[in-house]
Amino acid sequence: MKERLIRLKTIQKLIQTYRIESQEILLGYLYKEGFVVTQATLSRDLKLLKVGKISDGHKGYVYSLPGEEERQESERTYIHDFLRGYVSIEWSGNMVVIKTYSGHSDSVALAVDNLGIDDVLGTIAGRDNTVFVCLREGVSGEDFVNRMKESIPELET
């Protein structure tokens, strides 16, 4: 978990410092910084950081970080979607089941994925009203709920 947070901060610093046109180039910079990651991991990191590509004005496109205001607005949207859609949260060990109102499982799962809770390995949205959340080994459902409450203080369980 700690390594991922350091890697995310390093990715932000690299994007702000260098003209990076591709994941391959970014992987090279990360390697020089001491990180050995796969393209798939980097892709997930870029998605989590909401990195996009913008025109550099003449040669092509480069990676760009969202502004703080844009990031906060996006986070507020995910929080709103989660609160609007969830009914209850229950867990057993490192497995969590979030019951949702009918038709809200996709938006609740997307919110959990995008709130940046590092303890989440992944989510699976059911067809209609259930989200399954798999947590990292050693992380309990109670830990997950406490972290969710840090991001969403109005969350009631």
Image (cartoon, helix red, strand yellow):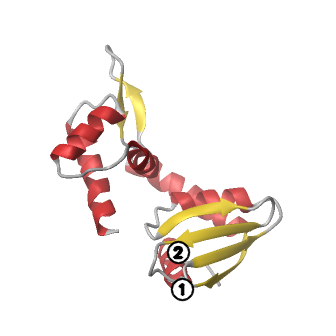
Residue for badge 1: 142
Q: Position of residue 153 (x, y in %)?
A: 53, 77
Residue for badge 2: 148
Quadrant position of the N terminus in the picture: bottom left
Looking at the image, do the residues carrying marks 1 and 2 touch, with CB atoms under 8 Å apart? no
Q: How many marks?
A: 2
Q: Position of residue 136 (x, y in %)?
A: 47, 72
Q: Position of residue 100 (x, y in %)?
A: 75, 69
Real-space CA distance between mark 1 and mark 2, rounded to the nearest whole angstrom: 10 Å
Lateral position of residue 28 relative to residue 131, left or right: left
Q: What element carries label 1?
A: helix
- Residue 119 occupies which quadrant of the picture? bottom left
Q: Residue at x 33, y 22 (%)?
A: 56
What's the mark number on residue 114?
none
Q: Is residue 19 above or below residue 73?
A: above
Lateral position of residue 129 relative to residue 114, left or right: right
Q: Where is residue 66 in the image (x, y as percent from the top left)?
A: 40, 44
- Residue 23 in sight from this viewpoint: yes
Q: Is mark 2 on a helix, strand or loop?
A: helix
**Discs 1/2, front:** 1
| Depth order, front residue of 49/3 | 3
Q: Which residue is drawn at 62% across and 76% down?
A: 96
Lateral position of residue 31 relative to residue 46, left or right: left
Precedes in sequence: disc 1 or disc 2: 1
**Residue lying farthest top?**
58
Tag 1: residue type?
Answer: Glu
| Depth order, front residue of 137/68 | 137
Tag 2: residue type?
Answer: Met
| Depth order, front residue of 72/50 | 50
Lateral position of residue 112 relative to residue 28, left or right: right
Q: Is residue 152 above or below residue 110?
A: below
Q: In this view, does 39 lie above or below 131?
A: above
